[in-house]
């Protein structure tokens, strides 16, 4: 092995790390090369020795023979060695093939007529496989190696290697690309007819299964689920110790194997034959009952233990375990009256196992190999005929594909120490002891963990504790320690330290033990980590401060918005008369929050004597909602006053809402125009709830004309509807806050409003009628603003006053 000269390092200087890394990389590469060379040389020497043993020639002649044969077949020496090891026949048996002059007897006859017709890419692939076979030592590793080489080019999904047993059946030596459940199902195959692997072995020729429908009718095919592998090939080859071996290549895609694929697979099995002959380790053991020696071993163990084998369901998931062997102590712990648990299912002898943490611990150990140890638990057992409560813990370790479960009994002292350790861990505290006479100190392991101190450095003397604290906390801790030592006065001090996990908030409580003269001789103390609690306290204070600040901001905004809303939306103190109608208005802000919403109304008499009623609801709350409300309210009135139709006004308002920079969101609205000369009510809506009409004791909602909410579409469609009012009629225009009660649907609120109006007094409205209606509708806390226009048509009267007669004269004119 080559070595690099040492890099000179001057006094106080550091070595060149880049140069050191380069040297290490070179040495590693050289080591890998030497290992590869040693493994390859071992294969060549083994092949040369086999030739010498069979022919009796010299070592040089055997080596020259291998080189000549490799050159004639256009193969590498390593490939020729693998093929030679796989195809050698005992001396004297002959093959019936004439030998060329000078060819040693006992070797297979080479193809001298012409070199084999192998594509260059196939030859390169076989050379790579020959090199990788050097590092394969087991049948399972061989299967994985073949899958890595055949998967990319041949679309191979799985590889299986079978050997014929003495009884004529098959045994699975190795596999790759299939799960253990399927491997267990097909690990041993009886000598049945109709098995493609046996057919290939008996015929000594490959079996190419390329038509799934036809092949499944002829053979019993391996597969889970059925049809997973649509094509497969079984290629027999002579195995080690004279046993017949067959390699299977299974593909998920259908279709035939090309001529190139067949040439490559035949070359692969010739190389594998030599590798199989060199295996010294036995094949993977088949699942079955443990040997008598294992059972005898468990019977002699002086502890409670079991050997478990997993039992898998159709999906491969572990459903139970089989107890292969158990000690008498384990049988007693599981309930000695049920007999020996060996050979039975674990859940049969331990029914409540799945309800304990031991079951997931077993599954995790089986899957990942991590040893599991349970928390201590109490178990009542019978000792010398008397019931006794003992403490145990369960330990689970993996042994290949099995589990070893042991029960550990804890003595009383062990339990006490364990409880103390659990108490310190859960309480995040530890104990400390200082001897003031000898100067000795001792800490529990939890104190070292709290202070982020390496136990190898030992505990800190009592007088040195203040040096660990922050400078701001050091003086208080120093005074407390000094007073404790001089006067024996106990203390409780909080301080901060800085460690690997950042700043830690700690609490130290200490007291002294005095001698017969009252002088302090020992100090006992506890150190507790309060970092999590302190951080929670600081976070709570910060959160409260932020909440108060936010509340003040929102409260100020609410006050501002409420003032702005009152200025923009003045409420009449009493009912008003418009165009012969009696109109009562109610506006109730939300109680669920501190922000003001965007509900609004408008009720005015137009220049031509008609009355305009508008109710709207802007999405959202706060200043933005109030600003949008003001824009829509005044714009809607202006458009109708200047002669725009109801639908035209809604279309223009929709455009305004979409393109105005000062507004955003959506809004619902209902516009109604009342003509007193013929008592006609024309109305249109944009995504709003329909008006409610009460007449002669009957209540119903007006049919809504088409209309999409404002701000939702650039091309909305609006329509008008008409209703002729009669004397004594009552019409309600309202926002959804009057009828909505989450989480119920709005239809329930509409029905509730209709029932409440039907139960109200008749055509003679009195003071407080609308207020009574609101009380019956708004029982709980209001989550949204409520805006209501209560419009009433006066009933028929016996006579008219002077004002009514004058108004009638103006209408006639």
Image (tube, helix red, strand yellow):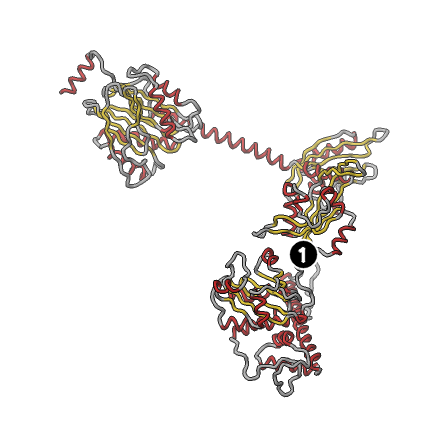
Residue 463 visible in image: no
Residue 556 vertical position relative to residue 156 in the rendered view, above or below: above
Give the crowd class for mark 1: few <14, some 14-19, many >=20 residues within 10 Å: few
Quarter of the picture holding the C terminus: top left
Q: Nearer the viewer, residue 538 or 319?
A: 319
The part of the image, by quadrant, that contains residue 506 is top right
Q: Nearer the viewer, residue 44 or 244?
A: 244
- Work out which residue is located at the far bottom of the displayed protein and give it: 101
Q: Look at mark 1 in the image and give the residue it sits on.
A: 288
Quarter of the picture holding the N terminus: bottom right
The part of the image, by quadrant, that contains residue 598 is top left
The part of the image, by quadrant, that contains residue 290 is bottom right
Describe residue 594's horizontal placement relative to residue 342 as left or right: left
Q: Position of residue 596 (x, y in %)?
A: 40, 28
Q: Nearer the viewer, residue 76 or 10?
A: 76
Residue 798 visible in image: yes
Residue at x 51% of width, y 75% of height: 119
């Amino acid at each position: 092995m080559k070595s690099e000269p040492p890099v000179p390092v001057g006094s106080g200087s550091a070595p060149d790390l880049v140069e050191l890394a380069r040297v290490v990389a070179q040495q590693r590469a050289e080591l890998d090369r030497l290992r590869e060379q040693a493994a390859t040389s071992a294969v060549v020497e083994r092949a040369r020795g086999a030739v010498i043993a069979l022919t009796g020639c010299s070592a040089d002649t055997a080596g020259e023979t291998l080189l000549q044969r490799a050159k004639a077949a256009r193969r590498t020496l390593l490939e020729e060695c693998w093929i030679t090891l796989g195809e050698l026949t005992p001396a004297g048996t002959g093959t019936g093939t004439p030998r060329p002059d000078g060819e040693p007897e006992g070797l297979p006859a080479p193809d001298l007529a012409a070199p084999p017709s192998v594509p260059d890419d196939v030859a390169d692939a076989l050379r790579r496989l020959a090199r990788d076979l050097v590092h394969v030592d087991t049948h399972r590793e061989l299967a994985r190696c073949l899958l890595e080489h055949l998967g990319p080019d041949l679309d191979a999904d799985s590889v299986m290697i079978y050997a014929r047993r003495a009884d004529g059946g098959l045994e699975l030596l190795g596999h790759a690309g299939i799960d253990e459940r399927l491997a267990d199902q097909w690990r041993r195959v009886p000598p049945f007819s109709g098995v493609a692997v046996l057919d290939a072995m008996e015929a000594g020729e490959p079996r190419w299964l390329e038509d799934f429908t036809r092949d499944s009718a002829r053979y019993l095919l391996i597969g889970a689920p059925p049809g997973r592998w649509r094509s497969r090939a079984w290629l027999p080859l002579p195995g080690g110790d004279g046993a017949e071996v067959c390699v299977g290549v299974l593909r998920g895609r259908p279709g035939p194997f090309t001529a190139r694929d067949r040439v490559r697979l035949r070359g692969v099995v010739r190389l594998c034959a030599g590798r199989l002959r060199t295996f010294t380790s036995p094949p993977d053991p088949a699942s079955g009952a443990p040997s008598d020696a294992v059972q005898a071993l468990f019977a002699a163990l002086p502890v409670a233990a079991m050997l478990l084998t997993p039992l898998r369901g159709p999906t491969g998931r572990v459903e139970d375990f089989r107890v292969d062997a158990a000690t008498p102590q384990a049988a007693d712990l599981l309930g000695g009256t049920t007999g020996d648990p060996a050979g039975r299912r674990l859940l049969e002898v331990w029914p409540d196992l799945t309800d304990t943490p031991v079951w997931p611990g077993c599954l995790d150990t089986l899957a990942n190999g991590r040893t599991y140890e349970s928390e201590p638990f109490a178990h009542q057992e019978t000792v010398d005929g008397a019931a006794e409560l003992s403490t145990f813990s369960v330990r689970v370790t993996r042994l290949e594909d099995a589990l070893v479960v042991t029960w550990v009994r804890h003595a009383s002292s062990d339990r006490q120490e364990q409880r103390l350790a659990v108490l310190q861990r859960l309480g995040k505290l530890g104990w400390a002891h200082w001897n003031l006479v000898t100067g000795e100190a001792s800490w529990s392991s939890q104190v070292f963990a709290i202070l982020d101190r390496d136990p190898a450095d030992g505990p800190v003397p009592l007088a040195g504790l203040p040096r660990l604290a922050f400078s701001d906390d050091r003086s208080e801790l120093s005074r407390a320690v000094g007073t404790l030592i001089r006067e024996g006065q106990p203390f409780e001090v909080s301080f901060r330290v800085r460690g690997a996990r950042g700043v830690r908030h700690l609490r130290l409580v200490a007291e002294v033990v005095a001698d017969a003269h009252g002088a302090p001789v020992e100090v006992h103390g506890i150190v507790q980590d309060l970092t999590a609690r302190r951080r929670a306290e600081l976070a709570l204070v910060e959160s409260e401060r932020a909440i108060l600040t936010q509340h003040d901001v929102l409260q100020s905004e609410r006050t501002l918005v409420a003032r702005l809303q009152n200025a923009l939306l003045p409420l009449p103190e009493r009912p008003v008369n418009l165009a012969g109608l009696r109109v009562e208005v109610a506006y109730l802000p939300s109680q669920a929050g501190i922000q003001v919403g965007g509900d609004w109304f408008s009720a005015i008499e137009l220049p031509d004597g008609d009355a305009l009623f508008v109710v709207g609801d802007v999405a959202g709350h706060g200043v933005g909602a109030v600003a949008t409300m003001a824009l829509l309210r005044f714009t809607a009135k202006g458009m109708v006053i200047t002669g725009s139709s109801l639908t035209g006004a809604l279309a223009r308002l929709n455009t305004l809402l979409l393109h105005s920079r000062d507004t955003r969101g959506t809004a619902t609205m209902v516009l109604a125009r009342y003509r007193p000369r013929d008592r006609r009510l024309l109305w249109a809506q944009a995504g709003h709830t329909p008006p409610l009409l009460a007449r002669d004791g009957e209540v119903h909602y007006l049919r809504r004309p088409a209309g999409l909410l404002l701000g939702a579409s650039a091309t909305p469609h609006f329509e008008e509807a008409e209703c002729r009012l009669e004397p004594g009629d009552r019409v309600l225009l309202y926002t959804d806050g009057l009828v909505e009660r989450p989480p119920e649907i709005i239809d329930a609120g509409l029905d509730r409003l209709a029932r409440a109006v039907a139960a109200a007094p008749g055509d003679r409205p009195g003071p407080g009628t609308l207020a009574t209606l609101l009380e019956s509708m708004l029982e709980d806390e209001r989550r949204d603003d409520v805006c209501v226009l209560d419009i009433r048509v006066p009933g028929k009267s016996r006579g008219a006053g002077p004002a009514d007669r004058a108004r009638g004269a103006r209408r006639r004119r």
